[in-house]
Image (cartoon, grey):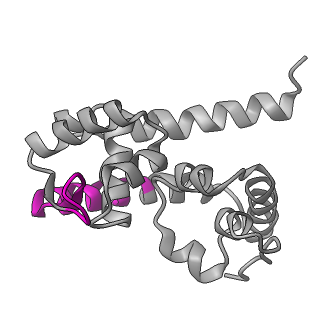
Amino acid sequence: MTQRTENLLGVLALLVTDEMNAQTTVAALAGPTARAILNAVGQYPDSSIEVLRDAVDLSHPAAVRAVAGLAEAGLIEKKPGADKRAVALALTTAGRREAKRMQTARERMLQRVVSRLDDDERVVFEDLLIKILWHETRDPAHAMQLCRLCDDGPCLAAGCPVECREQGLPMPERSGS
């Protein structure tokens, strides 16, 4: 039987997911996969579809279709890749603008949720999140999937638990911020 803690975590996960899904203003970004690909192209510029499909856990044909939709919407562009069979993907000006809008909306929503906690509760919550994420990260592809919508700056500066686990490093300490 599910315990109350697990239920509450599931509800919080749905709250965050539903709010992120509701923030879409561009039809081509109606699905979470398209938003994840757009963000991944921003995080890993000039990467191939093969690299990005790992970040969003898609088959190659599904990733090609998703990329085609984003390119058709003018959000990403295809450039010559490392070899003749591959293409390098980059955000267009519209894509950068939309990725920034999505990142800002995500940041505001998460700040609102976490703002319900006082300083001591934030410390405990961050410590628990670090522990859970460090233990749940399975491999490099899974790490990319977990962080596919992240603003990686704050975590990388402080020691991202997902990145640390993926690289075989110890669980990071709390940043103190």
Using the image, determine if residue 109 lies above or below residue 165.
above
Q: Position of residue 151 (x, y in %)?
A: 46, 66
Q: Position of residue 144 (x, y in %)?
A: 53, 55
**From which residue to which does the magenta span run?**
81-106
Q: Quadrant of the C terminus?
A: bottom right
Instruction: Confirm whether the magenta stretch covers residue 105.
Output: yes
Residue occupying image coordinates x 48% and y 47%? 54
* Count of numbered marks: 0
Q: Is residue 14 left or right of residue 176?
A: left
Looking at the image, the residue that sits furthest to the front is 84
Give the camera-side residue of 165 and 36. 165
Using the image, determine if residue 62 lies above or below residue 85.
above
Q: Is residue 99 left or right of residue 176?
A: left
Q: Quadrant of the N terminus?
A: top right
Q: Position of residue 98 (x, y in %)?
A: 21, 54
Residue occupying image coordinates x 74% and y 57%? 129
Q: Is residue 26 visible?
A: no
Looking at the image, the residue that sits furthest to the top is 1
Q: Is residue 33 left or right of residue 158?
A: left
Using the image, determine if residue 73 lies above or below residue 103.
above
Q: Position of residue 38 (x, y in %)?
A: 30, 51
Residue occupying image coordinates x 89% and y 26%? 3
Q: Is residue 148 visible?
A: yes
Instruction: Confirm whether the magenta stretch covers residue 113.
Output: no
Give the camera-side residue of 95 and 86. 86
Give the camera-side residue of 89 and 83. 83
Q: Is residue 65 left or right of residue 133?
A: left
